[in-house]
Amino acid sequence: MFDPKKILILAPHTDDGELGCGASIAKFCSEGREVHYAAFSSCQKSLPAGLAPDTLERECKSAIKELGMDAGKLMFYNFEVREFSQKRQEILEELVSLNKYIQPDLIFIPSSSDIHQDHQVIHNEALRAFKNSSVLGYDLPWNQNRFSPALFIKLSAPDIEKKVKAIKAYQSQSHRNYMQEEFIRSLARVRGVQSNNEFAEAFEVYKIIS
Ligand SMILES: [Zn+2]
C-alpha cells in the first residue's frame, strides 16, 4: 500500500528536511525511489557572523549527498527567514509550479502543530498546492507542543547513520541542541519503540491517495 514512486520534501529552511525525515530519505534513495528536495530559504540572516552567505546551501548539498540523493534534485529558493507570511501568494505559486513540474505522489511538510511562522506558511500553502499527492507531516519536536503520528517508517541502522552524517554536514548549526547526534539517535529510538522496531521516523498523516 505504501509504495511512493516520486517523493518531494518541502523544507522551509535548509536542514528541516534532513531533521524531519532524513533517514526516510536515505531509505527511499536506497530503494531506488525518486526523491526531490525544495528548500525555501538558506537563512542568510541567521548565520553566525563571519560565515559566507551561501554557507547553508553548501552544507545542504553535502547533507543530501550523505543521504544518497541526486544533487540535481535539490532546489533552493531565496525567501527571507521569518518573513514567509509576507510572501504567502508567491510561495503558493512556486509550490503550484513544483507540483506541475514534479507531479509527486507523496510530499513531506512541516506538521500542523509546528509553531515556527515560516513552517506554518509552507504547511498551509502545500495543502493548497498539492491536491493529488499523499501528504505527511514530519516531526520537529522543538517546534511542536503536540504531535499525533499515525504513520511510522521503519528504518535500519545504516539509514540512521546516513541521517547522523547528513546532520553533521551542517557545521554552521552544530551549536543547536537538536543537531546533536545523541538527540537524533534518541528520537529514532523513541519512534522505533512506538512502532515495535529498532528505529523509525514518525509522521502525521493529512492525506493518503493510493
Ligand atoms: Zn525551519
Image: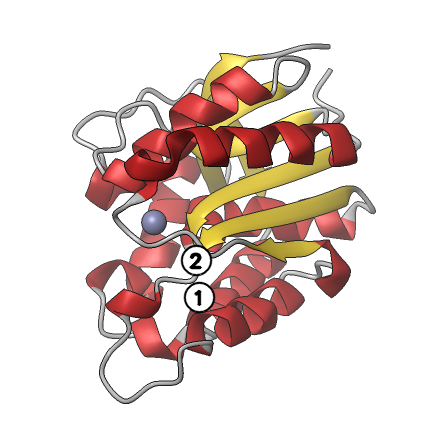
Question: Tag 1: residue type?
Answer: Ile
Cβ atoms at labels 2 and 1 below 8 Å apart: yes
Query: Front-most of 51 and 135?
Result: 51
Task: Specify the amino acid type for callout 2.
Answer: Asp
In the figure, residue 50 lies in which quadrant? Answer: bottom left
Q: Position of residue 204 (x, y in %)?
A: 42, 22
Disc 2 CB within 8 Å of nearest ligand 1 atom? yes
Mark nearer the N terminus (2 vs 1): 2
Residue drawn at (44%, 18%) of the image: 150
How would you rate the neighbour count of disc 2 (Cα within 10 Å): few for under 14, some for 14-19, many for 20 or more? Answer: many
Q: Position of residue 135 (x, y in %)?
A: 55, 21
Task: Please give the residue where the numbered disc 1 appears in the rendered image.
Answer: 167
Describe residue 101's horizontal placement relative to residue 155 as left or right: right
Task: Choose between 110 and 90: the one closer to the eye.
Answer: 90
Taking the spot 52% from the left edge, 40% from the top edge, the residue there is 10
Count of number-bearing discs: 2
Q: Could you tell me if residue 120 is visible in this image?
A: yes
Instruction: Give me the disc on residue 13.
Output: none
Q: Position of residue 83 (x, y in %)?
A: 28, 45
For this orientation, the residue located farthest to the bottom is 50
Check residue 15 in the rendering and tell me which mark sits there, or answer none.
2
